[in-house]
Amino acid sequence: MEFTQLTPGRAFQSLQSLLYYTQRIVTPRRLRKAVVTSLAGYLRARHGMPESKTAADLTHEKALAALHADGHALLGPLLTPAQLGELHGYLADKLVAPHGRSLPTFLAHRPPPDVRMAEYSLADTLACPHLLELANSAPLLRLAAHYIGCKPTISAIGLRWSYPQTGSGSGLQAFHRDCDDWRFIKVFVYLTDVDEAAGPHMYISGTQHEHCSMRLQAYSNDEIASRYGAARISSVTGAAGTGFAVDTRGIHKGMVPTQKPRLLLQIQYSLLPVYMYRYDKPQRMAMGMEPLDGYINRLFVRPPKK
C-alpha cells in the first residue's frame, strides 16, 4: 500500500486529510464509541451484513470474545499445505521492494544486507492464489463484521518479508499503536513457519481499550515490561498457515527475526476506507473467480467483464 499526501504540498489531498485526521483527533473513548455506533448503524442499514453459509459456531464466538476482551484472537490454520505450496510457487519469481520504498526491487530470497522488510506489489498480492478467497471467506468476514458492527471494507492487503537482523527494531518492529480508522481489525497469516527466531507477532493484551492520544508514539521494551508486566505480553508462534486477528489500536509489534526470515499476509477490515492510503483504480477480477461482494472489495477489485 502507498500513502497519500495528507499534509500541504505537492499532491495534497485535502478531503482525505480531513477525513483521516478527524478520526485521529477524536480520542475520548465514549465519543469514539458513539461515532462508531452511528456509522456502523448507517452502513448496516444501507449495505446489510455479510451473508454466511454457516451459522455462528463456538470457534467464532470464542474468537469474537477474545477480540473484545484481549484485542487479539488465535484463528488456527487458515491455509492448507497444498494452498501454501501454490502460493509460494506463484511468488517464487516475483520481485519485492524495501518497505516504504518502491525501488530497488529484488527477489525475496536475495535481500540486500541493509533491508529489514520488503513487500510484494499490490498487483502481485491480489493475483496470488487463495489470498482474495481467504480475505472473503465467510468466517473472516463474519468475525470482522461482528467486531466492527457492520459489513466491513477490505481496506488493506499485503505480503511482507521480515529479514534477520541484529539490534532492536524500529517502526513496525517496535511497540506501537495503529490509528487507521474509527474501528478496524487486521488478520495476519504466517506464510512461513514462525518460532521465536523468526520474529513472532507480539501484543499487549487489553491495550485496545486504553485512551489513545492523537500523537502516536513508539514504546521501548523496558517501558512495556515496566507498565504492563510479562503476563500481558502475548507472542504468537505457529506453523505456516497459522492465522490470528488483532485490533492493532492496541500496542503491538513484529519482532525482528534473528535467524530465519518471515513472510506475513495482512488483511485489514475497517469501518471506512483508510484515508491515509492512496487507492488506485480497482483491478478487474479474473474470469472464473467466485463472485465477490462488490461493497466489501470495492477498493481493490471489480467484477469481470461479461
Image (cartoon, rainbow, N blue to C red):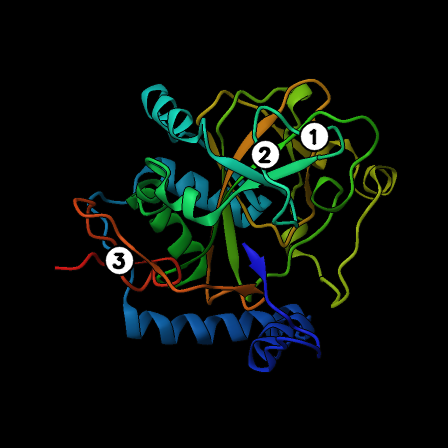
Instruction: Estimate the spatial distance between the alpha carbons at disc 3 and disc 2, rounded to whole Å.
Output: 34 Å
Question: Where is the C terminus found, in terms of image quarters?
Answer: bottom left
Q: Are marks 1 and 2 in contact (CB under 8 Å)?
A: yes
Name above or below for residue 203 compared with residue 212: above
The mark nearer the N terminus, 3 or 2, is: 2
Sequence order check, earlier mark of 1 and 3: 1
Q: Give the number of the mark in front: 1 or 3.
A: 1
Work out whether residue 14 or residue 91 is closer to the camera in this orientation and state it: 91
Q: Earlier in the sequence, mark 1 or mark 2?
A: 2
Secondary element at image label 1:
loop
Residue 25 position within the rendered picture, expressed as x and y whole percent measured from the top left: 69, 74
Name the residue that disc number 2 marks. Answer: 106
Distance, label 1 to label 2, CA atoms, is 8 Å
Viewer-nearest of labels 3 and 2? 2
> Could you classify mark 1 by the number of other residues whose Cα lies within 10 Å: few (under 14), some (14-19), or many (20 or more)?
some
Dot label at residue 112? 1
Q: Which residue was labeled with disc 3?
A: 293
Quadrant into which the N terminus falls: bottom right
Return the x and y of residue 257 as percentages of the image width and height. 69, 26
- In the image, 91 versus 150, the foreground residue is 91
- Among the 4 quarters of the image, the one containing residue 46: bottom left
